[in-house]
Amino acid sequence: MTAIYVTVGILVSLLAFFITSQILFKLIFGRDVSSNSDKLIPKRLQPDIKIMQVLEKENAAWLENITKEHLWIETKFGNANAFYIGHEKKSSQLVVLIHGYRANKKQLNSMANYYYEKENVDVLLVELLGHGQSDSEYINFGYYDHKYIINLIQSLRAEHDYQVYVHGCSMGSVIALWIGSVYPVSGIIADSPYGRLKDNMKDNIPYIVQPITFLFTLFIGRIAKKRLGFYVNDINILDKVENISTKTLLISGLNDKIVKSKHIKKIQKHMKIIPDVWYIEDCPHLGAYVLKKDEYQERIHNMLVGL
């Protein structure tokens, strides 16, 4: 009888793991259309969320009213959307702006305004699959996104002789680094990147289940492979950034509770070039552009002019 109880216990545990993993997969990879999602955010993350809300509100009217061309590209998950803002002065530089996890082009309002109005460059605002006006029931964490963004860049380069810069925020910064590792660009700005998705997942799941994180990662990875075609472990730029050969700026807030500063240190160790690394004291997730805007813009300017 003892053996039967043990067997049943193991089967029940595996079933519980499977069901919990399905729920976690949906929460992590599923497209969020809930208007009440903010209510689920832990209190420890509220400062980070408030900063991101500030980013969305700044220059919102400007982005809404500026003339922009709606671009899209077909993927196996549906259409991926982007918005191209060509400068009236016909710039030779294109900045590709990539938003973060569960955000959209609104997160890039203020940065797009600065690039266009102050630096006089053309801007491409990307909306990742599973976000904004782009299709897809699931978020792919850049696994497919980086490929279609490169296709968009190439289509614009066919018409303009551009120097291209990629500037990403949070998950978007991971994608910016991914693009820079496989496609020639003139510069990369990565604001709050992580090296491996599974490491960042571990940082953000409830502490009570952290001792068995590897099991959830295994189960969630198998679900992701079946539904999306890749494992959680495939979202890893640590084995890619060594291929980056252009100037790169890595940014991290030392009070970032969503993507901790330790991730930048790992990324830096795997790069062959010496990136410019900027740590900001008492700064939450993506808070640098809000709290240190003048210095942030100066660093952007220096990259564009080659300093």
Image (tube, grey):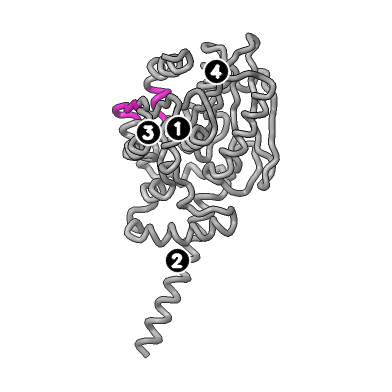
Distance from label 2 to label 4 (Cα)? Answer: 46 Å
Which mark lies nearer to you, 3 or 4?
A: 3
Whether pointer 1 and pointer 3 mark residues with C-beta atoms closer than 8 Å, the reply is: yes
* 33 relative to 265, above or below: below
Disc 2 packing (10 Å; few <14; some 14–19; many ≥20)? some
Residue 259 shows in this picture = yes
Q: Which residue is mark 1?
A: 244
Q: Which residue is drawn at the image coordinates 59% and 27% (left, top)? A: 125
Q: Position of residue 208 (x, y in %)?
A: 33, 57
Q: Which residue is mark 3?
A: 272
Distance from label 1 to label 3 (Cα)? Answer: 8 Å
The range drawn in magenta is: 277-291
Whether pointer 3 and pointer 4 mark residues with C-beta atoms closer than 8 Å, the reply is: no
Disc 4 packing (10 Å; few <14; some 14–19; many ≥20)? some
Question: Which comes before the other along the chain, label 2 or label 4?
Answer: 2
Frontmost residue, 251 versus 45:
251
Q: Which mark is residue 113?
A: 4
Secondary structure at badge 1 equals loop
Distance from label 2 to label 1 (Cα)? Answer: 39 Å
Whether pointer 2 and pointer 1 mark residues with C-beta atoms closer than 8 Å, the reply is: no
In the rendered image, the quadrant that contains the C terminus is: top left
Whether pointer 1 and pointer 4 mark residues with C-beta atoms closer than 8 Å, the reply is: no
